[in-house]
Image (spheres, rainbow, N blue to C red):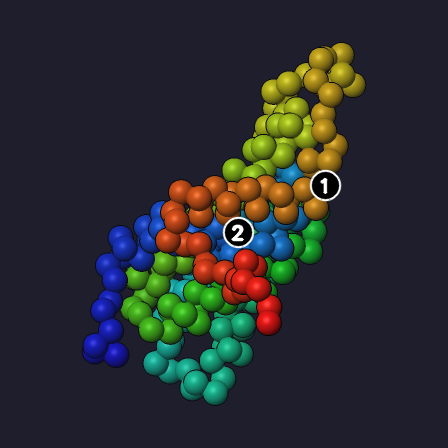
Amino acid sequence: MSDVKVPTWREAFLEPLITNNPVMIQILGICSTLAVTSSMKTAFVMGISVTAVTALSNYAVSLTRNYIPSSVRIIAQMTIIASLVIMVDQILKAFAYDLSKQLSVYVGLIITNCIVMGRTEGFALKYPPVQSFFDGLGNGLGYMVVLCIIATFREIFGSGSWFGFTIMETVNNGGWYVPCGLLVMPPCGFFFVGILIWAVKSYRKELIEPAEYDTHKEDY
């Protein structure tokens, strides 16, 4: 462990925000990204929830990493994450019940979110608590940024509103805009995630994976 370079808290925080986004670069957390981005309210609350769970679970796992036998580390991590998710779920039910109902089972499924498990296993078990906390914070915020970008387009063009406030008056309310109902359906999230990933990889060519098969090579 002495040979492992320990990143500063700033490096741990900024890397997932700028150079290694968990959704657009690591391709993690896709399921919830598709499910909760039909409106900004649900996307924002889900992003905050995942950020809180990721940061605090990273911190807790890092604090206890030297006391957890490797044979039960996954069970210990799941216990910590599940406890935090239950707390988040209860807080949402107490203070934002309507949003909690809209998010439905997706808050509980934070327990199985690849980002949360990936950071506790890949980072928190190796590095000190402060760096682990900021790594979790950065990954959670990086996830939330992507959710909010997708939700902005889907809500504005799918419902004519943003955060529930009317942006374009729809024909149903006497306005001019005919909302595209397809945009608020979960499958539409695939297109927006794909477009974002394509945009990032078009800008950063080094992220493009080499082709597994040469389609121009003749078979003999």
Picture layout, residue 39 above or below residue 135: above
Which residue is disc 2 drawn over?
49
- List the single residue furthest toward the right: 172
- The answer to which of 181 and 219 lies nearer the viewer is 219
Q: What whole-number distance in Å separates the C-alpha atoms at marks 1 and 2?
A: 22 Å
Picture layout, residue 215 above or below residue 187: below
Q: Nearer the viewer, mark 1 or mark 2?
A: 1
The residue located at (48%, 50%) in the rendering is: 24
The residue located at (37%, 53%) in the rendering is: 206
Place of residue 56 in the rendered image (x, y in percent of width and height, measured from the top left): 43, 61
Mark closest to the chain's N terminus, 1 or 2 = 2
Which residue is disc 1 drawn over?
185
Picture layout, residue 182 above or below residue 143: above
- The answer to which of 74 and 68 lies nearer the viewer is 74
Q: CB under 8 Å between callouts 1 and 2?
A: no
Residue 44 visible to the viewer: no
- The answer to which of 183 and 8 lies nearer the viewer is 183
Determine which of the numbered discs, if any, sits on residue 176 in the image: none
The C terminus lies in quadrant: bottom right
The N terminus lies in quadrant: bottom left
Q: In the picture, residue 99 is in which quadrant? A: top right
Q: In the picture, residue 86 is in which quadrant? A: bottom right
The amino acid beneath tag 1 is Met
Place of residue 22 in the rendered image (x, y in percent of width and height, measured from the top left): 46, 55
Place of residue 177 in the rendered image (x, y in percent of width and height, measured from the top left): 70, 18
